[in-house]
Amino acid sequence: MPPATMTEAGHPPKPHRGWRERWLALRNGLVASPGFQRWAAGFPLTRRTAQRNTRALFDLCAGFVYAQVLFACIRLDLFKLLQDGPLAPETIARRVDLPLERSLTLLKAAASLGLLSRLRDGRFALADLGAALIGNPSVGRMIEHHAMLYADLADPIALLRGESGATRLARYWPYADPRSDAARVGPDAVAAYSGLMASSQALIAGDVLDALPLAGRTCLMDVGGGEGVFLAHVARRHPGLALRLLDLPPVAERAGARLTAEGLGDRVNCVGGTFLGEPLPAGADAITLVRVLHDHDDAEAMAILRAAYTALPPGGLLAIAEPMAGTAGAEPIGDAYFGFYLLAMGSGRPRTVEELTAMLKQAGFTGIRERRTRRPLLARLLTASR
């Protein structure tokens, strides 16, 4: 009698498929059929779904073009140009130094994407999205920064297979390159990326602090604190809290200069060092990791969590704030955008709340809970107790 795992012909048996898998196979076969697609596009009960799916598929194909339209608007400072009111296409063309027809191509494209609106008299004005970008200059810096990401994604298969060599993003974020010695990164190497981090940190600092319970804490250490933007917000909200920043020596030096210029130099102790492979300084009863863990692979992320556990006293607070995978309504941000961004960077991955919770437990933390933030697509917040 043949083994139960083999058929009489000597081949492994086909896996049993439940009703759900059979239904999905039938459904996918129908949706893939050109004839069914034409029928669904004309049938009243399926027409709207078919049109929505067609538009979604086309948007996926055209996404890079849309992003480049936005990039062109940023590089030409188009939104600031229209900040004081609508302008005629001829005036805009003159101001941005483009031929009128090319300007109209850009203006109409931007209007179709909700960045601008075209008035009845032919002038163009800011729409909600364009106006929002004026109030968030850090977003503009990120959009310009994406030129490197797009170059790294020119051959996504080579990137996935690890065949693309040193990427532009890995060179831009030197601490993420496994071949570099983070402790020896020089001032010139950190200037660009720490400035970008500082400008984007302001986007989430208020949201995190709205949800972070710091009452009763005496000293907060921000690990990987960059140029101190987050701690500057903390200093203004919690004037009695002692503050410490830990980052690479040239970054900590920049943080000290920035905080001194803001009149906060005496509030924050900026410490130069690495949080990988070395113990964290003791003495703080609260530690924050703001957009730090997702930049590191699992082994390094666990080392950071264990170091934080060792540095905290009993009852100490650890807070993790970063965009996370599996965020309802923002799934592409975690899994698509950050998944490929961090892949190109050469280090880290987006993690779900459940994955981070498991890692915190493994590091010894208890009392783990998520605290609601205003914009979870930008940053979610987990806290845990030592």
Image (cartoon, rainbow, N blue to C red):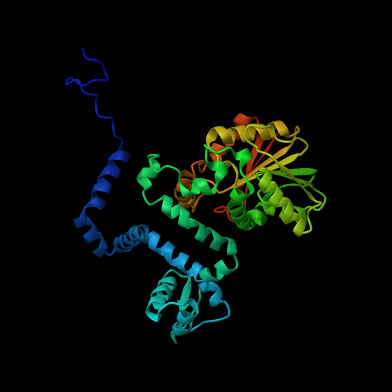
Q: Position of residue 328 (x, y in %)?
A: 50, 50
Front residue of 51/342: it is 342
Image: 280 above or below 263: above
The number of numbered discs placed on residues in the rendered structure image is 0
Front residue of 283/68: it is 68
Residue displayed at 76% across by 39% down: 284
Image: 161 above or below 258: above
- Examine the rendering and report whether any part of residue 43 can be seen: no
- Examine the rendering and report whether any part of residue 275 can be seen: yes
Quadrant location of the N terminus?
Answer: top left
Front residue of 381/252: it is 252
Q: Position of residue 13 (x, y in %)?
A: 24, 25
Name the residue at the bottom extreme.
121
Residue displayed at 51% across by 68% down: 129
Q: Position of residue 116 (x, y in %)?
A: 48, 74
Quadrant location of the C terminus?
Answer: top right
Is 115 left or right of 63, judged from the image as shown? right
Is 266 left or right of 46, judged from the image as shown? right
Name the residue at the left extreme.
9
Residue displayed at 38% across by 76% down: 102
Is 381 left or right of 61, judged from the image as shown? right
Q: Position of residue 205 (x, y in %)?
A: 66, 54
Is 17 left or right of 75, judged from the image as shown? left
Residue displayed at 49% across by 71% down: 76
Image: 32 above or below 185: below
